[in-house]
Amino acid sequence: MTCSVKFFKSKKMRINTLAFLIICVLLNSCSVQKYVPEGQALYVGNKVKVQADTITKPNVSDLADNLESIIKPAPNKTLFGFPWKVWFYYFIGEPKDEGGLRSWFRKKLGEPPIYASQRIVDINAKNMVSFMDNEGYYKSSASGKLNYSKKKTATAEYEAYVMPRYFINEIKFVVPDSSTFNKDLVLTNKNTYFRKGDPIRLDVATAERVRIDQELKGKGYYYFNPDYLIVRVDSTIGRQDSTMAPQQVNLYLEVKKETAQTALKQYYINGIFVNTGTNEDTSADSAVNRGPARRGIAVTDPGKLYKRRIFYDAIGFRKGDLYNNKTQELSLTRLVNFSNFKFVKNNFELVPRSDSALLNVTYELAPLKKKSIQTILSASTKSNNLGGSQIDVSWKNRNFLRGAEILTLTAYYGFDIQLGGNRIENPNRVGNEFTRYGARAALSFPRFVIPFYRVRPEKSQVLPKTVLSLNYENRVQKGFYTTTSIRADWAYVWSKSAQLEHTLTPIAWNYVRTGNVNTELLGRIAENPNTNPLDLYRYFQLIDQQFFIMGSNYNISFRPKPRPFSKNQFILLGGVDYGGNLLSLLAGKNKVDSLPKEFLKTPILQFAKFDGEVRYYRTINSKIKWANRFIGGVAIPFGNSRTMQLPQFKQYFAGGSTGLRAFRARALGPGAYNPDTTSVRLFGYNAFGDIRLEFNSEVRVKFTDIINGAVFVDAGNIWSYRGSAEDGYGAESVFKKGFLNQVAVGGGIGLRLDFSFLVFRLDLATPFRKPWYTVTPADSDPNAPFDPDAPVQYKNPWVFKEINFGSRTWRKENLVLNIAVGLPF
């Protein structure tokens, strides 16, 4: 999309506008004062000053911001000193109905007055001292006072005097004997969050207690909890040992003496019971309805709706097993992931006998409605001036074969229309607008559908899934041609943990053909002298394509969980997609050697595609985060298809709201290729490539709970694997040595509205580097003498000197507004 920028036309207008704003602020300021009771003042701000100890001079960076964040209550918000939210609160007035429109506006636009109080300031000062103690700044102090103004407002001013910070020398786990519990407690020291040389912090100590509790629960200590642990701090070691720095502490972690003996005992699983929550025969005794216990699990299913094996696979406990919290969490996750139950609850009960170490576990389930229909209406707008909508109607049948299978049938219809730009140049929008419609069927099994394979729930992490799907779609390019696609997949999804997921599709069959070609339009395009021969040849190939793909693909996702208090996070994604090898062996050789093999008179596509993606996030502070992404991919036709062009859905494109945001989707590349005006007018932006390299980096800033901002830079491009002056996109589109000279760069600013359930995003970007300038001759001096032997001078691809926000033409061509839902990565 394009946007425009408006400026004040005169200095007089700017002065008048500023004067008007100042008068409004002054008048409104007076109107708030009359609501403030005599002797009171509105609390409108605070300031924290941090003074480091003059002798030891400790590092106090960011401490002022941290202290300010704990000040309660928050002051009334002001704009140029004017408490505008309080003004709205009084201006709207007391609502008659708490659920009415006036009440809603008052809560959204206004806020009740907060009156300044020295007592609150003193409490905040004490909280600051506690905070500094918890961060290791022992013996520090803080004080505060109120500063009043004549406008019945007040600000709080705090001063913190910071003493040296204490750091960890060593951590010791103190145990009185060598009992089983104490041995297990000492073993948890291996993964401790305490590190030698780190500052002593209360939140780390709290997290350490939780970590130890989780490890002990993983060894059967069901009744243990973090409150039974205490961490003692010895801050005198620096004075006792002259070889050590004075600000050092030793930590001693031990179990409180008053801890109950039940918390120090290991527990084992006795009985496992499942109640499916079905309604039939609910009056009957549950013991009568309960089926025989198999694998140690007794299932109560009066309605006989479920095959018992799904519970045997989902629940990891077996009779006689040592209690384990990870097995418990995993069992609940598996039952929830069946997507067959509204809720899943469980409880553990101690077997009632003296000195019992046995637990009975019961799972209570509530089935979802078996059949349901869902309608989804979506709308989209794209940076290539296309906007559209799609409606999806889905019918879902849960527990289709009584084994928690889910059958989903979906029909959809959508369209994309031209919103601007080419709409004027191509009034009939022939070839620029699209309609798509089709249907999908998917059957999901919560297990591997493989002969002779059996789930080992006590060893597997997340239950595997088998998905069979069939898709049919027609995509109509208005007034030009129709592409029909039929696809069938057999896929497996599994993971060993929540961090690592695998997806293997051993059978991926796809049939694609084009039809309903408007030969009259194609003839006019071919006869047009302004049509680029390369574009014409490429479109002839596109509308004449028909092929079979029978292959396999594999994708992996690795999302490691960051260590507690770590500021870094990584995500790795990758995939391999290949096809045609098996089908090529079964097909006969074409009578014409230069043509590919055929299966049922349809060419077979052989290709290999490799993709990789790395994401890195770093938290700078509570309000700033740095996000980065690198993407690389290559798709190569080979063997039987070495002379064929890959279909567009197997290729890459650049630009758009999740890629290089300074360029419209499909408007960039490949390489230094730049479509001419005629091609864009007829077909819109339609550039695809076989190789993709892209890097994105942005700094995300949190202004409020809802309003966030960003500054970003994107770089990259797409390239063709092969091409020439007579084929593809031309020689300048091919990936070769010196490809870095064809990298595009852009950047801009973004506004994100975070509503928790979705993020609405606006990113405004402009190009910094245009790769096609490397093959675009520079404007020559008309007064210079003509020299046929002089080397051709090309434009500078860096376009900072061209930036001109005051030019409407420049803004239309270079400012790209991306509107999207969700973060780009």
Image: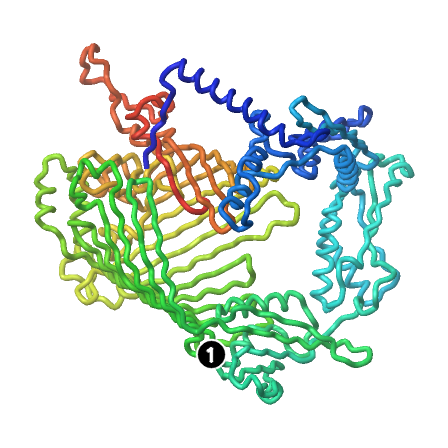
Residue 379 percent across, percent down from the top left = 34, 50
**What residue is rendered at 60% in x and 49% in y?**
562
Task: Specify how the rendered protein is coloured.
Answer: rainbow
Packing grade of label 1 (10 A; few <14, some 14-19, many >=20) is few
The answer to whether residue 3 is seen in the rendering is: yes
| Horizontal side, residue 445 vs residue 80: left or right | left
Task: Identify residue for label 1.
Answer: 452
**What residue is rendered at 23% in x and 14% in y?**
781
Residue 38 percent across, percent down from the top left = 70, 29
**What residue is rendered at 42% in x and 70% in y?**
444
Front residue of this view, candidates 412 and 172 = 412
In which quadrant of the rendered view does residue 228 lie? bottom right
**What amino acid type should be assigned to the residue bearing mark 1?**
Phe
Front residue of this view, candidates 686 and 807 = 807
Vertical side of 133 occupied by 269: above or below? below
| Horizontal side, residue 443 vs residue 86: left or right | left
Residue 420 percent across, percent down from the top left = 25, 38
Q: Identify the element where label 1 is drawn.
A: loop
